[in-house]
Image (cartoon, rainbow, N blue to C red):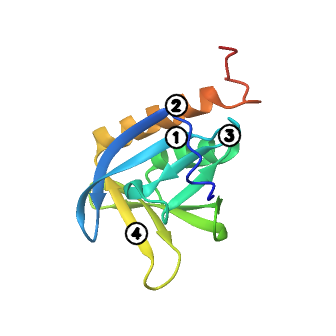
Amino acid sequence: MSAHSRRSFTYYRRVTGEDLTTGHCTSQIELTEDRRQVYLRLASTAMFAVLLDADAIGEVIEGLQANDTRDVEVPHVERGIVTLRIAPHRSRISLGLFLSEDENIQVAFSAEQRKELVEHLLGGLAWLNGSSSSTDS
């Protein structure tokens, strides 16, 4: 059983964006079962899913808000450590994973979608065990 098949829907959010190759898509933010990380599933796929701990969530949010190019090293369940690239794309911001020449994705978010993505990441952060912002609920 893959780690991606054990899913917790305690915290599950979706945000729309645009896959720069295929068009409109929805990405997901989900809490892991142990509440130590969140999955960021670009285009809602296991292939392009990475795990974000509290520090990585902070780095991603900072990059999204800074509107500059930034790389964040994050774990991928099957590939080990990979680079999540945050980069401006025209009037939007994109998140990209480049696993191989044939396996890559860039999802662009408008200003409103970016705001929603940041809010969902902050919400996920609040659910993490051991996070200074987590609550005992």
Q: Nearer the viewer, mark 4 or mark 2?
A: 2
Task: Specify the quadrant of the image occupied by residue 50.
Answer: bottom right
**Residue 54: which disc?**
3
Residue farthest along the top direction in this orientation? 137
The first of marks 4 and 1 along the sequence is 1
The residues tagged by marks 4 and 1 sit, at their Cα atoms, a distance apart of 19 Å
Q: How many marks?
A: 4
The residue shown at (53%, 43%) is 61
The first of marks 3 and 2 along the sequence is 2
The first of marks 3 and 4 along the sequence is 3
Q: Nearer the viewer, mark 3 or mark 2?
A: 2
Residue farthest along the left direction in this orientation? 23
Quarter holding the C terminus is: top right
Q: Secondary structure at mark 3?
A: helix
Identified by mark 3, the residue type is Ala
Bin the neighbour count of mark 1 within 10 Å (Cα to Cα): few under 14, some 14-19, many 20 and up: many
- Counting from the top left corner in percent of width and height, residue 64 is at 46, 48
Residue farthest along the right direction in this orientation? 130
Of residue 82 and residue 34, the one placed in the foreground of this image is 34
The residue shown at (29%, 38%) is 112
Q: Which residue is mark 2?
A: 11
Q: Secondary structure at mark 4?
A: strand
The residues tagged by marks 1 and 3 sit, at their Cα atoms, a distance apart of 13 Å
Bin the neighbour count of mark 2 within 10 Å (Cα to Cα): few under 14, some 14-19, many 20 and up: some
**Residue 47: which disc?**
none
Q: Which residue is mark 4?
A: 105
Identified by mark 4, the residue type is Ile
Decide: marks 2, 1 in contact (CB < 8 A)? yes
Q: Secondary structure at mark 2?
A: loop
